[in-house]
Amino acid sequence: MGNRLSKIYTRTGDDGSTGLGDGSRVGKDSLRVNAYGTVDELNSTIGMLLAADGVTADVREALTQVQHDLFDLGGELCIPGMAMVEDSDINRLETILDGFNEPLPPLKEFILPGGGMAAACGHLARTVCRRAEREVIALARVEAIRSQPQRYLNRLSDLLFVISRVLARTSGHGEVLWQHERRRKPQPAE
């Protein structure tokens, strides 16, 4: 077990830098810190989702495991050269995703974020997940990063979309479909 924090503030970051897991220091606005910081934000949004009423037991079980995975993923990004997310984690997400998606009706329209508080929190988590994925991609363009974190986040955003659909339906609110026909067809400019 690593060191436990007995004192929360250290003042070492007052200069705009932060320590990575390997002891090196980088700017708090570095691509690496942005990547693992957004993964941390994603984990928090999933915590909000789990705190919402109407989260089913199977969703709770899946997302609790995801929170542990995200902590590992953040650790991998915080410690250059570390490998914590495995292909088996991605495969597990795909299996869970397939299980949640199978009973859902096929999509014929885009879905708007909504469908009750739990589903809306799921959509928020999905968008933060997409941002985390973009941050990891940006980091991978300038530093050596394994493909597993990016692939995990890509699959997780799909899972969060499907979970949001499930929660919208089980809550009784239903999915909010984009009504593309609400606008008149554009007329050619004169």
Image (cartoon, helix red, strand yellow):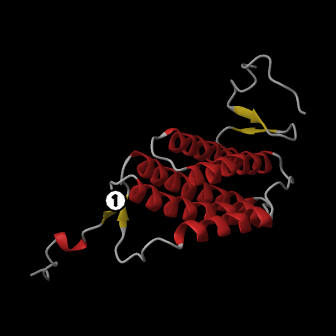
Residue sitting at x 69%, y 50%: 65
Q: Is residue 141 visible?
A: no
Q: Position of residue 127 (x, y in %)?
A: 49, 55
Pick the quarter of the image with the N terminus.
top right
Pick the quarter of the image with the C terminus.
bottom left
Pick the front one: 31 or 94: 94
Q: Is residue 101 visible?
A: yes
* Crowd band around label 1 with a 10 angstrom C-alpha radius: few (<14), some (14–19), many (20+): some
Residue 120 relative to residue 62: left or right: left
Residue 155 relative to residue 142: left or right: left
Tag 1: amino acid: Gly
Question: According to the image, label 1 marks what residue?
Answer: 174
Can you say whether 18 is above or below 186 in the image? Answer: above
Q: Position of residue 42 (x, y in %)?
A: 59, 47
Pick the front one: 133 or 106: 106
Residue sitting at x 85%, y 56%: 83
Q: Position of residue 41 (x, y in %)?
A: 59, 43
Pick the front one: 96 or 138: 96
Residue found at the very far top of the displayed protein? 7
Residue 166 relative to residue 2: left or right: left
Quick one: SS at disc 1?
loop
Can you say whether 43 is above or below 108 in the image? Answer: above
